[in-house]
Amino acid sequence: MRWGYIPTNWGYFWGYNLHTFLDKEYVIALTDAKLRALKPRNKPYKVADFDGLYVNVTVKGGKLWRFKYRFAGIERLLAFGAYPIIGLKSARNLRDEAKTNIANGIDPSNLKRKQKQGMYDNARNTFTAASAGFLSKKIKEGRAPATLHKIEWLLAMANADFGKLPLSEISTRMILITIKKRENLGHYETAKKLRSTIGGVFRFAIASGLVDNDPTFALKGALISPTVTHRAAITDKAVFGGLLRAINRYHGQVTTRIALCLLILTATRPGELRLAQWDEFDIEQRVWNVPAIRMKMRKPHMVPLSKPALDLLEELRAHTGHGAFLFPSNGSCKKQISENTFNQALRRMGYGSDQVTAHGFRATFSTFANESGLWHPDAIERALAHVERNEIRRAYDRGQHWDERVKLADWWGEELEGMKGRNIK
């Protein structure tokens, strides 16, 4: 039944509210002119448009869009924002969209709440935030300061390009562009480590429930693989004997000479010796206990001390025994010598980086010890603090071959004296 036009300000007609039964074409809809003309009153009031959409006018003059609807038999209210930021046409479109969701069995209020939570999560779950959590995890795991510094350096590159973006919006292409910047400069190893570090952040985020996938997975094999360059090492006894004599004649810092000799005798990594402290050495038991935090595999390492090593420690104590570190820097007894000290000393002696490096002393020890045929390969590997990669074999071979390693250390000291032709110190 159609009624003709009936003014809505009649209030009730025959006991019925007109808005409960009049078609919208007979209701006076809102216009922009009417919206602009709405003035505040002593208390908030509503002005209807149609199909549940209305404007709530506040006592301060604000005009707020509201949509009243029923879902699952319950009356609900949805806010669309304020006029004129949300115009009349936009408000009606939002109302129509909400009605479509209702028809499809979706509560628009719940949908809006989820969308708002998603926006909040995106703002919180940025790559920068996730990378901070990843770095914190590495710190708790006891990673070495040098390793943490390198991770920070790599993460800074990634954060500069997409750190502010939510993890879910970072694509494989974005990451590839960032990595290719380094690869195009010829920094192949840096590019490879950058991909690995970014992937580590995403895997951390997946484990934390922040994202569902790792976009770096598709980049495996996409980068140039750098040629592996092994650290230069001398494996000829006559040539190595010449180096030992050159170290003995070294005219630089006495402590540097002693450090090079100890590095050769103990077959440890340069960083493990450079950061050594006096309280790690048990002279009576002839052992050096290297803490896990300084070891590459994060496991404590015991180094047997031969007589030549003990003699060098006695000589060194006269120079640095008053402080905490075996090899403090010249500028401060609270800092250790530079990581370049050992190699710089070798260069001053006339040995190029293609001939020998401080880290290469380990390869020299391994070569001569294995060639001798006197020692079990596992004892040599334990002396080098290498961890068995085969999990089954590692589970059954937990011994450190300590007794054999003590004899190996004494043998190595004698071998060095023989190669040099005189005492090592």
Image (tube, rainbow, N blue to C red):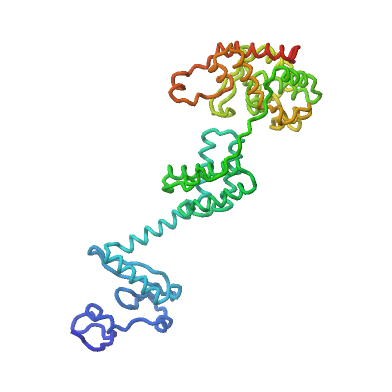
Residue 236 higher or lower than 183, as above or below: above
Q: Position of residue 413 (x, y in %)?
A: 67, 13
**Please, which residue is most extreme toward the right here?**
251
**What residue lies at 41% left-to-right and 56% top-to-bottom?**
118
* 134 in relation to 375, above or below: below
Q: How many marks?
A: 0
Q: Nearer the viewer, residue 198 or 26?
A: 198
Q: Nearer the viewer, residue 355 or 94?
A: 355
Q: Position of residue 12 (x, y in %)?
A: 23, 82
**Residue 19 x/y as whole percent:** 25, 79
Residue 58 seen in the figure: no
Lateral position of residue 370 relative to residue 332, left or right:
left
Q: Is residue 228 visible?
A: yes
Q: In the rendered image, which quarter contains the N terminus? A: bottom left
Name the residue located 32 percent from the left edge and 84 percent from the top edge: 28
How far from the left and from the top, in percent, is residue 134? Answer: 51, 42
Residue 26 falls left or right of residue 386? left
Quadrant holding the C terminus: top right
Q: Residue 192 appears in which quarter of the rendering?
A: top right
Q: Quadrant of residue 66?
A: bottom left
* Placement of 225 over or under 365, stated as above or below: below
